[in-house]
Amino acid sequence: MAIYARPRPTTGIKALGCLCALAAVGLSALYPLVLFGASWTLGKVDEAMMADPGEPSRAVTPASYLIAWTTIYSFILTTLCFGAVFCFVGIDRWLPKDATMTHRDVMAARFLHVAQDPSRRTAGLLWAMLAGVLLVACPIALMAVLNVLIYIGIYTEIYIESARELVDEATLDLLLLHIVLFVALMRTAVRRRSSAVRLRPHGMAVADLKSFTLPLPSGRDNFRVQEVPTRRGRVEVQAVYTPPAKGAEPGRQVIIPRLSLTPRLSQLDDARSRVEARLDEVWRATQLIRTSIEQEETADAPTSEAEPQPA
């Protein structure tokens, strides 16, 4: 786990996000032309295959063109969409182990949050972009596979009603495969990119990452690890946060789900140490905020002037 600071987008960054969003909308409006171009290229592939059935290498050139510009179009559209989102949301700044933050930096940031390390977050971004490319190219891929199946049926002279049903079934299976791949890629990306804990000077968000209703911890003792047995002989190592007590009433315990692990019994000690290390990162993020607040309070404290001595 690592600590990140989410900055507030400036006016220029928001303007760039608007331009990216407009470019993405304009590029999406050209999607019918892209589908028409794909069908025209597939027609060229059919012509090349039927002109000389014994030499299928003639169809390689239009097919390579189809794959190339479909991939380029999907990548550009996905990049514009992600760029617009990041311009409005903000790009996280990774804070290394020895990082310090002033009160101005803390107040300028939207929040501090604990998430996966930078390499895993980068991999999650790549998975998300791959899912976007797959979503854009899905109709063209379905058209290409359907066209190839129809050509095989005509060439082998087996294109009868049963073959037509086989083509429809293969198209449906391919569509379901695209959906499964898209969902799997997005789940992987969300799991790698999502925050576990978010902190602001006035509160902390654990389960609902949009509501900073929990008070900041007063010490490392507010975080602990508990073990809960689950099915299939596994044990869930839960990260538990106990807010500071308000008067005589103890705080209600809150489970941090994205810091918890469910290992096997043989890996229980390792999972417990990993959860403790994640809680250490949360406490370090809390110390960054508390230290900046204390520095600001010390700087704003009135300095006592020496009283003049009577003559």
Image (cartoon, rainbow, N blue to C red):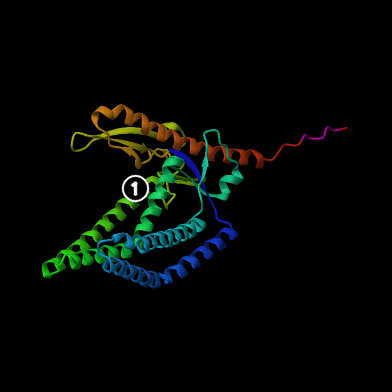
User: Observer-nearest residue: 15 or 22?
Assistant: 22
- Residue at position x 43%, y 49% from top? 213
Frontmost residue, 168 versus 20: 168
56 sits to left or right of 198: left
On the image, the x and y values in percent for residue 163 come to: 14, 66
Query: What residue is drawn where x is 20% and y is 66%?
Result: 155
Asked whether residue 194 appears in the rendered view, the answer is no
Quick one: label 1, few (<14), some, or many (20+) residues within 10 Å? some
How far from the left and from the top, in percent, is residue 58? 33, 62
Badge 1 marks a residue whose secondary structure is: helix
- Image x and y of residue 30, in percent: 43, 71
Q: Residue at x 60, y 43 (%)?
A: 103
Image quarter where the C terminus lies is top right
Tell me where residue 56 appears, x and y as whole percent: 29, 60
Determine which residue is flagged by label 1: 188
The prevailing secondary structure element of the residues shown in magenta is: loop
Q: Which residues are magenta?
A: 306-310
Instruction: State which quadrant residue 214 falls in.
Output: top left
Q: Nearer the viewer, residue 41 or 52?
A: 52
Q: Is residue 94 left or right of residue 246?
A: right
Give the amino acid type for the residue marked by disc 1 in the picture.
Thr
For this orientation, the residue located farthest to the left is: 162
- Give the side of residue 291 with respect to residue 225, left or right: right
Q: Residue at x 42, y 68 (%)?
A: 28
Query: Does the rendering let one see residue 127?
Result: yes
Asked if residue 307 lies in the magenta stretch, the reply is yes
